[in-house]
Amino acid sequence: MNYTPFVLACLFLVGCNSLKQEVDPRGLGSEPEKIVVACFISPQDTVLAARIGRSSTILGPDNRAVPDIPNAIVTMSDGTRSVVLKKTIDEVLGYTYYRAKPEQLPVIVGKTYTLTISVPNGQTVTASCTVPGPVAPDDVLVDSTVTTNFGLTRTEYYARLRWLDPAGEVNFYRVAGQNEYIYKTQIRSTPNGPVRDSLIRGQDSWVFNNGSTTTDLGRDGQELISSRGRLAMVYNFRNGEQPSRPKGKLTAYLLNVDENYYHYYDEVERQSKVRNNPFAEPVLIQTNIRGGLGCFGAYNESTLVTELK
């Protein structure tokens, strides 16, 4: 009889047990709750908005959502003018956020803005960011790949954005996009009526498996090409739906972002890829909120619209 697999299994279990460490609970949860901030500004904004919440301690309630703070005082300033963002409740999702009209404090390229949040218990946090200039995209490159999953072969479509990086300055970028598609489905006008084919038009966002952020590090002033974003389309066969292909309007967004925005989104994307892997190295998400957590960042958005035939 071959005992090798049994011996190896025992050694593995012993090895895992040797990694176990006892932790004194008194050393956990001593960190107080912190204010968590999410606020991003742009010259293209139709609203100035910030969401304010509280962090959860290690030994606190098992609540993955960040609890909203409904009674904060949120002020944004450009050094000369300032505006107080008013509490608002989202009618659809029900969460609390703070907003103001951009006319009250225009977001201008090159200016530095400061966000200050105070809450009734005396906590105050601040953060600053500087608005970058626009960078125009030159072209959208569309290609396709044939894949086979679970015995089904299908064609997936991808897009990349190409642009010229401005020379002599450090730039950080994020790429996003949306596209229309048409698919055929079967509908029944009445419970017992005949089934007929119908064409449905949909629209959704691109998915970036390799991340949507990049920099011009080591490529200053050169032509840059983003990673591939998978175009939206219908893949399932429920209700007689047939595989679709992108067709119609394709909208690509090139965001020239500040360093705060870049690090935040880059690290959030990387963390989302490893969160279910117990052996993956954890990703530390940086914060520029002094005294708190989160991000106050700025970006400048340029758009390129094309038509897919």
Image: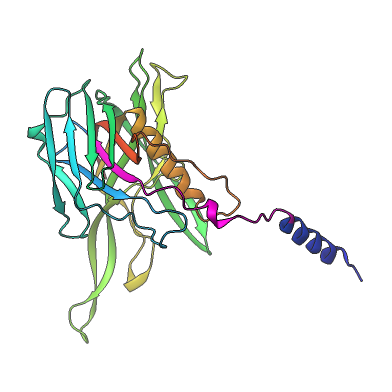
Q: Where is 20 relative to 308, above or below?
A: below
Left or right, residue 124 beside residue 268: left
Residue 44 seen from this side: no
Left or right, residue 96 beside residue 157: left
The quarter in which the N terminus is drawn is bottom right
Q: Where is 170 relative to 291, above or below?
A: above
Q: Where is 295 relative to 4, above or below?
A: above
Q: Nearer the viewer, residue 42 or 56?
A: 56
Residue 165 in percent (x, y) is at: 35, 20
Asked which quadrant contains residue 171, the reply is top left
Residue 210 in percent (x, y) is at: 46, 41
Q: Nearer the viewer, residue 14 or 273?
A: 14
Asked which quadrant contains residue 86, the reply is top left
Q: Where is 25 relative to 40, above or below?
A: below
Residue 75 located within the stretch drawn in magenta: no
The residue shown at (72%, 59%) is 17
Q: Nearer the viewer, residue 56 or 299?
A: 56
Asked which quadrant contains residue 302, the reply is top left
The quarter in which the C terminus is drawn is top left
Q: Nearer the viewer, residue 238 or 89?
A: 89
Residue 34 located within the stretch drawn in magenta: yes
Residue closest to the far top = 168
Residue 191 in percent (x, y) is at: 21, 85
Where are the magenta residues, as a range? Answer: 18-41
Left or right, residue 76 beside residue 125: left
Q: According to the image, what is the colour scheme of the structure?
A: rainbow
Residue 144 in percent (x, y) is at: 42, 45
